[in-house]
Image (spheres, helix red, strand yellow):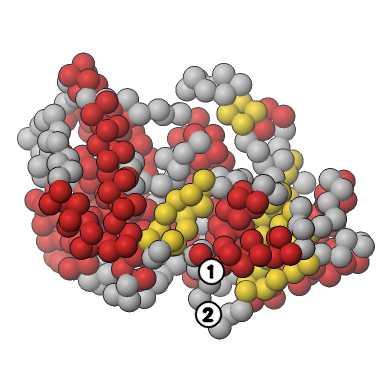
């Protein structure tokens, strides 16, 4: 039993100046989790229960959960998304779960599966104001403990406020038996956070964005630990898979602590979201989220590694949200353009409100490189670990060709209001040069 202590559940007067509430009451990673789950549901007097799974997750664990709850007299309802169609966290899936919740007057939903199932359930239960328990079947991403949900709405990945599960139950044997692509995905999702942390520090340094060192360290320590055990993970050794899952859980806890995706999502996620948009327009095939962000992290690390080619740091150029730019967004994003325009207007207002930080601090390139040194010193290990796990740095991987990469590096910063390395380079008037340099380096790099 891995119960959270009172101190873990509530962090009073953190050094960042905030109090943190972590709403996860119980984490059970044990072969006897079925008994623990039924005891927990009974102790909480939950009787109107809905189990949501997809076909693979139902075979892996969902059917066992259903049978266990029936044995102890809880009589749950269950719905399994058919495997004939790729399950996406879109309007159709959300509406289906809402319908089931209302039909059965449900008080708690058990999400059995990976990140997509949990994103759908965490969002719908948040909207319906009912309870949510996560039962992961693969260490595929950090969504299990997050309080936000990346959803595919109108073809565009949009992050929506959701809720953290009150408890997590899973079996180590189920995690180890997950399809390899899902273990790859979880690995990519976790260690790609090296660039998310870099983006967070960059924004804090330049604009005074809120920063919590405890949340930062939680993610950084987890990704370093997993890098050190990549060979064992390749062999699916139980302790390494459990370590990966624990790191993903910690990442979600960091998100809850910061009350923001910042500790776990940066420019690498924005690239992935844009690739999902391209896939929704049938320009490429979808790939697992964690594999996409791992691949994107390769590129973002190259952008960071090239910072020493700057002659200095200048006060950023204005973003220039003009009517011409808005028309360009309408052409590029179509019906999703309004979301993009709103995000960039929020970012512009945020940056303008904090412009005084530049005038007060006079940031220099030397200070910036020193600040980012702890992350940049890990880049070589991260890139090697990604390659070892089958996520290489090469043009054309996962259906992203050079033209698409160029579009990605220009447009990915538009998808969210959070400031990243791509915004910084745009403000320095250097983004196009960096894109050319990084792509040239990739063309010349030997394939591993």
Question: Which residue occupies 17% across, 40% down?
Answer: 319
The residue pinned by badge 2 equals 85
Disc 2 residue crowd, few under 14, some 14–19, many 20+, Cα 10 Å: few
192 relative to 274, above or below = above
x, y percentage for residue 16?
47, 22
Q: Nearer the viewer, residue 148 or 362?
A: 148
Residue 45: numbered disc: none
The residue pinned by badge 1 equals 92
Q: Nearer the viewer, residue 428 or 140?
A: 428
Label 2 and label 1: CA atoms lie apart by 12 Å
Decide: marks 2, 1 in contact (CB < 8 A)? no
Looking at the rendered structure, the secondary structure element under dot 2 is loop
x, y percentage for residue 217?
47, 34
Disc 1 residue crowd, few under 14, some 14–19, many 20+, Cα 10 Å: few
Q: Can residue 169 be seen here?
A: no
> Is 241 positioned to the left or the right of 7 in the image?
left
373 relative to 36, above or below = above
Image quarter where the C terminus lies is bottom left
Question: Which residue occupies 17% across, 68% down?
Answer: 403
Q: Nearer the viewer, residue 158 or 8?
A: 158
Q: Can residue 70 be seen here?
A: yes
Question: Which residue occupies 25% across, 36% down?
Answer: 348
């Amino acid at each position: 039993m891995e119960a959270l202590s009172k101190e873990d559940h509530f962090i009073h007067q953190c050094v960042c100046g905030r109090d943190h509430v972590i709403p996860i009451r119980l984490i059970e990673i044990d072969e006897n989790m079925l008994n623990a789950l039924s005891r927990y549901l009974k102790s909480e007097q939950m009787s109107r229960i809905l189990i949501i799974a997809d076909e693979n997750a139902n075979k892996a664990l969902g059917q066992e959960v259903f049978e266990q709850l029936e044995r102890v007299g809880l009589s749950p309802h269950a719905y399994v998304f058919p495997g004939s169609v790729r399950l996406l966290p879109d309007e159709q899936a959300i509406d289906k779960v809402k319908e089931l919740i209302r039909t059965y007057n449900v008080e708690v939903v058990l999400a059995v599966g990976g990140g997509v199932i949990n994103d759908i359930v965490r969002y719908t239960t948040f909207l319906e104001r009912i309870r949510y328990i996560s039962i992961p079947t693969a260490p595929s991403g950090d969504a299990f403990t997050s309080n936000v949900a990346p959803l595919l709405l109108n073809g565009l990945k949009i992050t929506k406020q959701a809720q953290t599960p009150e408890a997590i139950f899973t079996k180590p044997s189920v995690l180890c038996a997950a399809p390899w692509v899902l273990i790859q995905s979880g690995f990519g999702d976790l260690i790609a956070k090296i660039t998310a942390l870099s983006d967070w520090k960059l924004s804090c340094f330049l604009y005074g964005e809120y920063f919590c060192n405890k949340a930062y360290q939680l993610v950084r320590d987890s990704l370093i630990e997993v890098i050190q055990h990549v060979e064992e993970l390749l062999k699916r050794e139980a302790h390494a898979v459990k370590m990966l899952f624990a790191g993903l859980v910690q990442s979600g806890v960091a998100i809850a602590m910061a009350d923001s995706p910042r500790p776990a999502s940066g420019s690498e996620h924005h690239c992935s979201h844009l690739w999902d948009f391209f896939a929704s327009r049938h320009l490429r095939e979808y790939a697992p989220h964690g594999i996409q962000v791992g691949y994107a992290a390769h590129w973002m690390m190259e952008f960071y590694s090239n910072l020493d080619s700057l002659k200095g740091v200048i006060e950023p150029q204005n973003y220039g949200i003009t009517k011409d730019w808005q028309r360009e967004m309408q052409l590029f994003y179509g019906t999703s353009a309004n979301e993009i325009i709103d995000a960039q207007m929020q970012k512009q207002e945020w940056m303008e409100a904090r412009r005084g930080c530049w005038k007060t601090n006079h940031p220099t390139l030397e200070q910036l490189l020193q600040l980012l040194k702890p992350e940049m010193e890990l880049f070589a290990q991260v890139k090697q670990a990604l390659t070892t796990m089958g996520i290489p740095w090469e043009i054309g991987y996962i259906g992203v060709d050079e033209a698409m990469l160029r579009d990605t590096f220009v447009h990915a910063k538009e998808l969210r209001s959070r400031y990243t390395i791509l915004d910084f380079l745009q403000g320095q008037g250097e983004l196009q040069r960096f894109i050319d340099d990084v792509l040239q380096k990739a063309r010349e790099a030997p394939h591993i």
